[in-house]
């Protein structure tokens, strides 16, 4: 996508303007981001997903039988929904793009952002008054109104230690003051972008209120440090240890002196400061599937010749729902293809094609190593045949 093309999705801003002035900086209300938008599913269909095993769903009742802001986790039953009152509750279903292709198609509109930053699309339904309380998220999110209307109020950026209500399964802010002018009612096709740590409160204004939340991955510093250190540590020999050859006699044998700390610091920094290893770890962690058990590895290894024949006869492979791909160039002709937390070195054009939205058909066989890599990805569950996906 050209970064200087005005986008309706961004209210007429170009991608470059949005990333410069709004992304991770301040909210943006976009009226009519999607003209004539029709929500890909209705409340009953969303409730049906929430009743299925393996799908992450929550029910938030502001006035629950067990207390205020009661949270229940799916799968739910029809009886659960039958007992609910006419207002003041919210159903949230995570990763709907993994199960509904029409929802997954919406992600194509966000290609002005790195694809590996996208997390999933959560969809919520709420009757009048339904909300999850005023809160903050620690990631960027686009809130697209799918049907009905929702009122959004913003409370500005809040500190990490902002007090929250005790004893709840939700991080509801103890104090929330609406910023003047940051109070809107969104209709279908309207969208609100929020950067991390921006307090917001969304309240349903209709009996058909559905909101699609396009969220983005942002590993925390503690998660990244722990994960990277573990990754590096797995490949280190036991012989690489703290050493102090040539040290001077200590003035006090019980003292941890500056020289000892400097040696340990050097050991740690030299071990961790490896750009190639960091890139390998980062590609793997940012393509980890949201739900590992959603990918189904092949029971038997794929026969490469049979795969080639099938593709040449017109069959197509597709990326499995929930699979994540990215690539990083190693040199002018080679790259690492990252797929669902794994990394494979291959020709650069092949990595780019597999990580794109291009069709996975016989045309790929012209690229060196394509058949073998496709077979490996099929075995891992990252790819599947079109006809198997439609079954």
Image (cartoon, rainbow, N blue to C red):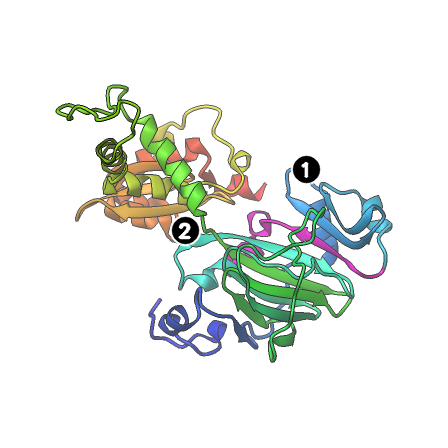
Disc 1 secondary structure class: loop
Relative to residue 78, is residue 41 drawn left or right?
left
Residue 240 point in image, percent of width and height:
24, 23
Furthest residue in direction front, as rendered: 251
Q: Quadrant of the C terminus?
A: top right
Q: Which residue is mark 1?
A: 53
Q: Quadrant of the N terminus?
A: bottom left
Disc 2 secondary structure class: helix
In this orientation, which residue lies closer to the viewer: 21 or 80?
A: 21
Using the rendered image of the protein, determine whether residue 287 is visible from the camera's viewpoint.
Answer: no
Using the rendered image of the protein, determine whether residue 378 is visible from the camera's viewpoint.
Answer: yes
Q: Residue at x 55, y 37 (%)?
A: 294
In this orientation, which residue lies closer to the viewer: 383 or 96?
A: 96
Could you say which disc has been placed on residue 116 in the image? 2
Is residue 194 highlighted in magenta? no
Furthest residue in direction left, as rendered: 246
Residue 285 point in image, percent of width and height:
40, 41
Residue 188 point in image, percent of width and height:
64, 71
Q: Residue at x 41, y 61 (%)?
A: 111
Please report the bounds of the magenta region as a residue range: 86-105
Furthest residue in direction top, as rendered: 239
């Amino acid at each position: 996508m050209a970064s200087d093309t005005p986008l309706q999705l961004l209210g007429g801003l170009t991608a470059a303007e949005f990333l410069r002035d709004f992304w991770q900086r301040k909210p943006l209300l976009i009226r009519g981001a999607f003209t004539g938008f029709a929500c890909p599913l209705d409340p009953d269909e969303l409730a049906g997903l929430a009743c299925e095993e393996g799908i992450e769903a929550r029910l938030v009742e502001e006035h629950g039988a067990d207390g205020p802001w009661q949270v229940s986790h799916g799968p739910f039953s029809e009886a659960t929904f039958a007992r609910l009152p006419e207002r003041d509750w919210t159903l949230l279903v995570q990763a709907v793009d993994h199960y509904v292709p029409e929802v997954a198609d919406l992600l194509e509109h966000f290609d002005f952002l790195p694809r590996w930053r996208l997390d999933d699309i959560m969809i919520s339904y709420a009757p009048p008054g339904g909300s999850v309380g005023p809160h903050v998220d620690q990631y960027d999110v686009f809130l697209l109104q799918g049907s009905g209307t929702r009122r959004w109020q913003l409370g500005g950026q809040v500190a990490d230690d902002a007090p929250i209500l005790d004893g709840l399964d939700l991080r509801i802010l103890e104090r929330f003051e609406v910023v003047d002018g940051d109070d809107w009612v969104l209709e279908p096709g309207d969208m609100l972008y929020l950067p991390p740590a921006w307090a917001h409160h969304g309240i349903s204004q209709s009996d058909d209120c559905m909101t699609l939340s396009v969220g983005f991955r942002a590993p925390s510093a503690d998660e990244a440090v722990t994960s990277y250190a573990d990754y590096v540590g797995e490949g280190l020999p036991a012989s690489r240890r703290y050493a102090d050859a040539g040290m001077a006699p200590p003035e006090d044998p019980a003292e941890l002196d500056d020289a000892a700390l400097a040696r340990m610091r050097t050991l740690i920094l030299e071990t961790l400061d490896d750009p190639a290893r960091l890139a390998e770890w980062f590609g793997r962690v940012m393509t980890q599937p949201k739900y590992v058990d959603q990918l189904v590895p092949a029971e038997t290894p794929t026969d490469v010749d049979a795969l080639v024949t099938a593709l040449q006869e017109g069959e197509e492979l597709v990326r499995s729902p929930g699979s994540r791909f990215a690539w990083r160039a190693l040199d002018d002709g080679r790259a690492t293809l990252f797929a669902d937390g794994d990394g494979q070195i291959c020709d650069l054009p092949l990595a780019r094609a597999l990580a794109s939205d291009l069709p996975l058909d016989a045309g790929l066989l012209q690229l060196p190593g394509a058949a073998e890599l496709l077979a490996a990805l099929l075995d891992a569950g990252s790819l599947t045949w079109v006809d198997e996906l439609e079954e």
